Amino acid sequence: MELKTKIHAEDSRQELVVTRTFDLPIELLFKAYEDPDLFEQWMTTNVVKLEAKKYGGYRFETTNPEGQVVFSANGTFHEFEPNKRIVRTFEMENTPFEVQLEFLEFEKLTDTTSKFTMHIVYRSVAMRNQMLQLPFAQGLNMAHNRLEEIVSKLKQ
């Protein structure tokens, strides 16, 4: 089955581009990235902090059934333009991955569809390639499927 979320990674480049067309108006797609309650639902993680503004910060934690933190990530928003663009850093804590820079673009296609593009820049080609060894594409596709399913209920 073909994944709806596409990942383009050119050889010898330290970046990748993620794209996805959603059957959601742009306002609802963007809301999924700025509303802590929605973000928690589609990303299946706990939002410890989400200051959705320029120079704001964020922190997410995922716990196991025993309540132990098994994944945490944090970053800073460098640009935050509603329904258009987010520029942020993203750092997975306690992993060999260094901080990455992410450019998120939100584009209105029609009144009911929108396009999401995320350009991720890694420190090195090796770091980018290491990320691609993980089930990154499948996980992101599953999260985006949940996003569309959960947020589409807000249209009604």
Image (cartoon, grey):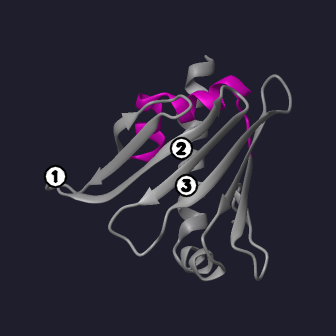
Near-viewer residue (54 or 9): 54
Amino acid at circle 1: Gly
- Using the image, determine if residue 26 lies above or below residue 75: above
Query: Which image quarter holds the N terminus?
Result: bottom right
- Using the image, determine if residue 91 lies above or below residue 88: below
Near-viewer residue (83 or 24): 83
Give the labeled residue for mark 3: 142
Answer with mark 1 or mark 3, whichever residue precedes in sequence: 1
Query: Tag 3: Cα neighbours inside 10 Å, few (<14), some, or many (≥20)?
Result: some
- Using the image, determine if residue 47 lies above or below residue 127: above
Residue at 70% x, 27% y is 83
Which is in the foreground here, disc 2 or disc 1?
Answer: 1
Residue at 37% x, 46% y is 60
The alpha-carbon separation of the residues under discs 1 and 3 comes to 23 Å
Query: Which image quarter holds the C terminus?
Result: top right
Left or right of residue 73, residue 7 in this image = right
Which numbered marker is on residue 27? none
Quarter of the rendering containing residue 5: bottom right
Query: Tag 1: Cα neighbours inside 10 Å, few (<14), some, or many (≥20)?
Result: few
The residue stretch that appears in magenta: 21-44
Horizontal and vertical percent for residue 88?
57, 46
> Tag 1, which secondary structure?
loop
Give the labeled residue for mark 1: 67
Amino acid at circle 3: Met
Quarter of the rendering containing residue 73: bottom left
Instruction: Check if mark 2's residue and mark 3's residue have beta carbons within 8 Å.
Output: yes
